[in-house]
C-alpha cells in the first residue's frame, strides 16, 4: 500500500487548504502564507503527517505549470514584446548584479570562491509562482511594477539553462568546455524560438479541430495535453517546465478559444497551486532554524534587503519613478522555488556542504513566507520614497494650461481620448510613467510629460490647480486611488473620471471622490445587453434609456441584487407591440429592381412596406407597382416576429 501514500498526502493537503483559505481571507492575508505554514506543520520536520516529498513535488510542479500557463493566457506576444527592454536589460542586470554582489559578500564572510559563486546564483532567482500569484490576486499584473516584475521573472526562467551549466562547470570543471556550454545555450534558445513559431501556426487549426468535435471532454483533455506537452518539450531541451507552459499560454492568448480554456484550467490551477505552496513549507527544517536562528534570520533578511536594493536601483536606472521601483524591488526580493532544484544539483556535485544547504533552504522559505506581508507594506514604503524623491524638471517648460484635461496613462484608452481632444481643439496634457513611451510620443509632438500620477509634484507640473477634468486610464488600482485622492486635494473642483477593470473597485473610488467610474467588465456587459435588445428591434430611445439607467450613479443597479424590476420595466409590453424599422437595399440584393408586389413581403412575412427613402426623398404609402432600387432604404412595420422574418427574407435567407 506504500505506493498509495501520495493519495493520502494530497487528501490531507486539500483538507487543510479549505480552512486555510477561509481563515486567511477573513483576516485579509494571502492564503499563500497559510499554505506555507501548513506545510511546516504537516511536514517531516513538523508533526510528520506527510513524509513522502518526491510525489508531492511532482504535483507541485504541475501547479507551477498551470499557473504560468494561465499567466501567459492573460498576455500576448505583442504585450511581451512591449516589455522587451525590461525583460532583457532589467532582467539581465538583475541576475548578473545579484550574482556578482552576492558572491563578493559571501566570499568576504569566509566561504570559498566556488561556494560563494554557487550561492550567488541561487540568490539571483525569485519566486515566479508567489510573485505572479500575488500580483494576479491584487489585479496588478498590468500595472507598471507588475510588468517590470513579469519581465524580470521571465528572464530568470530563461536564465535556467546557463545557470545549470555554470553549476556543472563549478562541480566538474574538466568535463565541460566553454564551446560545449555555448552550443548547448544556442541549441536551447534556438529550440524555444522554433517552438514559438511552430506553435503559432499549428495551435489555431489544432484548437479549431478540437472545438469542432463539440465534445467538452476532448477539448479539455486536448488543452491539458498541449500544456504538459509543451512544458515537457522545453524541459527536455534543458529549460524549465514553467517556461514551456508560459509559451503555450502566450500562443493560446491570441486564440478565440482563450476564455473557454481559462474556464477549464482555472479550477485545476487553484487546486494544484495549494499543493505547490504546501510542498515548499514541507522543506523547512524547524529544528535547524531553532538551533541556528541567528544565521537563518540574518541570511533571510540580508537576501531580502540586498535583492530589493539591487532591483530598485535597476528600475530607477531604467528611468521609472522611485515608487514603482520600490514596489518591484520588494516584490521580487525573495528567493525562488527553482533555487531548490539548483541547490540539490549543487549538493550532488559536492559544491556546498549540508550545513550551508540547510541555512540556504531555511532562509529561502522564510523569504517566501515574508513576501506577502512585505508586499502589503510595500505601498507605504513606496509612498514615502515618492515623497522624498527629487523630481527632475523637464528641459522644456510645460506651457501654462487652463480648463484643460489631464490624461493619466497613454495606453489605448488614453491615446483614443487624446486623439478626440486634439481633433476638437480641447487643450490637454498626458502624464505617462513609461519613459520609452514619453520619448517616442514627445518626438511626435505629443503634449506629454513623464511622471508618476500619484506624485503631487508631477500633478502640479501638469497644472492640476487650473485643470477642468482628469481622466485616470491606467491599470494600477493602487495608483489610481492615490492619484484621485491627491487630485481632489490639490483641486477640489476638478472632475475626475476613473477607468478600472473590475466592478469591485467602484465603491472605493466613489468614496474617495471619483465623479465617474467606468469599470470595463460592466461596460462589456452593457454592450452585450444593448446588442441583444437591438436584435429584438427595441426602439433606440428605449435602449438608450436602459443604458443610461444602468450607468446611472456608477452602475448601482448592476451592483444591486434587487434591481431587476426597475431596469427592465415595460420591456414585455414593448416586445408584444408593433414596431417600425428600416432596411437598406444593397447593390447586390436579389430584390433590387423588383416591385413591391413581386417581393410580396406582406404575404410571406406579415410585415408591410410603408415608405421608401430614395436619394433623400421619401415615397410614402408606395403601391405594389413601385420598384425597389439599389441604395433605397425601405421602412417596414409589423410585429417583432414579422419584422425579423422580413429582414431574413430581404437579406437573402428566405
Image: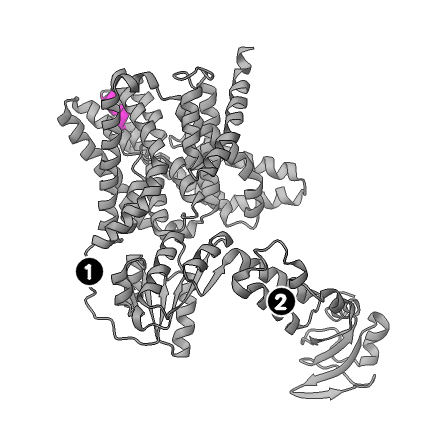
Which image quarter: residue 389?
A: bottom left
Up the image or down, 101 lies above or below 111; here it is below
The residue located at (44%, 20%) in the rendering is: 42
Is 34 contained in the magenta span? no
Quarter in which the C terminus is drawn: bottom right
N-term mark: 1 or 2: 1
Asked if the residues shown at circle 1 and circle 2 are in contact, with their CB atoms under 8 angstroms apart, the answer is no
> Residue 185: percent from the left, percent from the top?
32, 34
> Which region is colored magenta?
166-173
> Residue 588: percent from the left, percent from the top?
68, 73
Is 167 contained in the magenta span? yes
The residue located at (33%, 68%) in the rendering is: 491
Which numbered marker is on residue 546? Answer: 2
From the image, tell me which residue sits under label 1: 392
Of tags 1 and 2, the one toward the viewer is 2
Q: How many marks?
A: 2
The residue located at (68%, 43%) in the rendering is: 214
Amino acid at each position: 500500500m506504500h505506493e498509495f501514500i501520495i493519495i493520502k498526502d494530497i487528501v490531507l493537503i486539500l483538507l487543510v487548504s479549505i480552512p486555510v483559505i477561509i481563515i486567511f481571507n477573513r483576516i485579509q492575508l494571502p492564503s499563500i502564507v497559510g499554505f506555507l505554514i501548513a506545510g511546516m506543520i504537516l511536514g517531516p520536520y513538523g508533526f510528520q503527517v506527510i513524509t513522502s516529498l518526491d510525489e508531492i513535488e511532482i504535483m507541485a510542479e504541475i501547479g507551477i505549470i498551470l499557473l504560468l500557463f494561465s499567466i501567459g493566457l492573460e498576455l500576448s506576444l505583442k504585450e511581451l514584446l512591449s516589455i522587451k527592454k525590461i525583460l532583457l536589460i532589467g532582467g539581465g542586470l538583475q541576475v548578473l548584479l545579484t550574482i556578482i554582489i552576492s558572491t563578493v559578500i559571501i566570499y568576504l564572510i569566509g566561504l570559498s570562491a566556488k561556494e560563494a559563486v554557487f550561492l550567488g546564483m541561487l540568490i539571483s532567482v525569485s519566486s515566479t509562482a508567489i510573485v505572479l500569484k500575488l500580483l494576479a490576486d491584487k489585479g496588478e499584473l498590468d500595472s507598471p511594477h507588475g510588468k517590470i516584475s513579469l519581465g524580470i521573472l521571465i528572464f530568470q526562467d530563461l536564465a535556467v539553462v546557463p545557470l545549470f551549466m555554470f553549476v556543472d562547470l563549478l562541480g566538474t570543471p574538466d568535463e565541460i568546455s566553454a564551446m560545449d556550454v555555448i552550443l548547448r545555450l544556442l541549441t536551447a534558445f534556438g529550440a524555444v524560438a522554433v517552438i514559438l513559431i511552430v506553435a503559432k501556426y499549428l495551435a489555431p487549426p489544432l484548437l479549431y479541430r478540437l472545438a469542432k468535435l463539440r465534445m467538452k471532454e476532448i477539448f479539455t483533455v486536448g488543452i491539458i495535453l498541449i500544456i504538459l506537452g509543451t512544458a515537457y518539450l522545453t524541459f527536455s531541451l534543458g529549460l524549465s517546465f514553467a517556461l514551456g507552459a508560459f509559451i503555450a499560454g502566450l500562443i493560446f492568448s491570441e486564440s478565440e478559444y482563450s476564455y473557454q480554456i481559462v474556464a477549464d484550467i482555472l479550477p485545476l490551477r487553484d487546486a494544484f497551486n495549494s499543493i505547490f505552496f504546501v510542498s515548499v513549507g514541507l522543506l523547512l527544517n524547524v529544528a535547524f532554524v531553532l538551533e541556528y536562528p541567528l544565521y537563518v534570520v540574518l541570511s533571510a533578511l540580508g537576501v531580502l534587503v540586498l535583492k530589493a536594493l539591487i532591483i530598485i536601483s535597476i528600475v530607477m536606472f531604467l528611468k521609472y519613478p522611485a515608487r514603482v521601483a520600490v514596489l518591484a524591488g520588494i516584490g521580487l526580493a525573495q528567493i525562488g522555488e527553482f533555487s531548490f532544484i539548483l541547490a540539490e544539483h549543487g549538493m550532488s556535485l559536492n559544491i556546498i556542504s549540508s550545513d550551508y544547504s540547510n541555512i540556504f533552504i531555511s532562509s529561502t522559505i522564510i523569504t517566501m513566507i515574508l513576501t506577502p506581508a512585505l508586499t502589503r507594506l510595500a505601498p507605504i514604503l513606496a509612498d514615502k520614497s515618492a515623497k522624498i524623491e527629487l523630481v527632475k524638471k523637464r528641459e522644456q517648460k510645460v506651457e501654462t494650461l487652463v480648463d484643460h484635461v489631464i490624461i493619466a496613462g497613454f495606453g489605448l484608452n488614453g491615446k483614443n481620448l487624446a486623439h478626440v481632444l486634439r481633433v476638437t481643439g480641447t487643450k490637454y496634457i498626458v502624464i505617462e510613467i513609461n519613459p520609452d513611451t514619453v520619448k517616442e510620443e514627445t518626438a511626435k509632438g505629443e503634449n506629454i510629460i513623464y511622471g508618476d500620477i500619484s506624485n503631487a509634484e508631477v500633478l502640479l507640473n501638469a497644472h492640476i490647480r487650473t485643470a477642468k477634468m482628469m481622466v485616470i486610464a491606467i491599470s494600477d488600482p493602487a495608483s489610481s486611488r492615490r492619484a484621485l485622492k491627491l487630485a481632489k486635494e490639490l483641486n477640489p473642483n476638478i472632475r475626475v473620471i476613473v477607468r478600472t477593470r473590475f466592478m469591485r473597485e467602484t465603491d472605493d473610488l466613489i468614496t474617495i471622490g471619483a465623479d465617474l467610474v467606468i469599470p470595463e467588465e460592466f461596460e462589456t456587459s452593457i454592450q452585450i445587453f444593448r446588442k441583444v435588445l437591438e436584435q429584438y428591434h427595441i426602439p433606440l430611445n428605449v435602449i438608450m434609456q436602459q443604458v443610461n439607467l444602468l450607468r446611472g450613479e456608477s452602475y448601482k443597479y448592476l451592483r444591486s441584487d434587487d434591481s431587476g424590476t426597475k431596469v427592465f420595466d415595460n420591456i414585455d409590453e414593448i416586445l408584444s407591440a408593433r414596431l417600425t424599422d428600416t432596411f437598406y437595399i444593397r447593390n447586390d440584393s436579389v430584390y433590387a429592381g423588383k416591385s413591391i408586389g413581386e417581393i410580396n413581403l406582406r404575404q410571406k412575412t406579415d410585415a408591410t412596406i410603408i415608405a421608401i427613402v430614395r436619394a433623400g426623398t421619401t415615397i410614402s404609402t408606395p403601391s405594389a407597382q413601385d420598384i425597389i432600387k439599389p441604395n433605397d432604404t425601405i421602412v417596414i412595420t409589423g410585429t417583432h416576429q414579422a419584422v425579423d422574418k422580413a429582414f431574413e427574407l430581404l437579406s437573402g435567407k428566405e
